[in-house]
Amino acid sequence: MRRNFMEKRKGKLLFHKSGNGKACKINIPMPWMRKMKMNEDEREVEISFDEENKKIIIEKSSK
């Protein structure tokens, strides 16, 4: 039987001005990106917002 393991870390949002508005960035640990096989060549992601549960979900894009 395989367990579903979820690693959690605390982080901070980085706010910056973008044109006439503001934008937000967040750092994601490199070990997580390596496990997802993400790199400079494979960097497309899908970002979803679950408004009901107040969660942001980031998944590797299937292109």
Image (cartoon, helix red, strand yellow):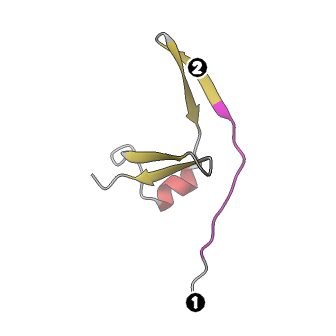
Q: What's the magenta region?
A: 4-13
10 with respect to 3 (left or right): right
Residue at 48% in and 10% down = 20
* Magenta-drawn stretch contains 5: yes
Q: Quadrant of the N terminus?
A: bottom right
Residue at numbered disc 2: 16
Label 2 and label 1: CA atoms lie apart by 45 Å
Disc 1 residue crowd, few under 14, some 14–19, many 20+, Cα 10 Å? few
Residue at 66% in and 62% down = 7
10 with respect to 32 (left or right): right
Residue that extends furthest to the left in the rendered view of this protein: 63
Percent x, y of residue 47: 45, 45
- Label 2 secondary element: strand
Q: How many marks?
A: 2
Up/down of 40 relative to 17, above or below: below
> Looking at the magenta stretch, what is its main secondary structure?
loop
Percent x, y of residue 9: 70, 52
Upstream in the sequence, badge 2 or badge 1? 1
Disc 2 residue crowd, few under 14, some 14–19, many 20+, Cα 10 Å? few
62 with respect to 1 (left or right): left
Q: In front: 55, or 5?
A: 55
* Magenta-drawn stretch contains 14: no
Residue at 59% in and 74% down = 4
Percent x, y of residue 23: 53, 24
Residue at numbered disc 1: 1
Residue at 59% in and 40% down = 27
Q: In front: 27, or 57?
A: 57
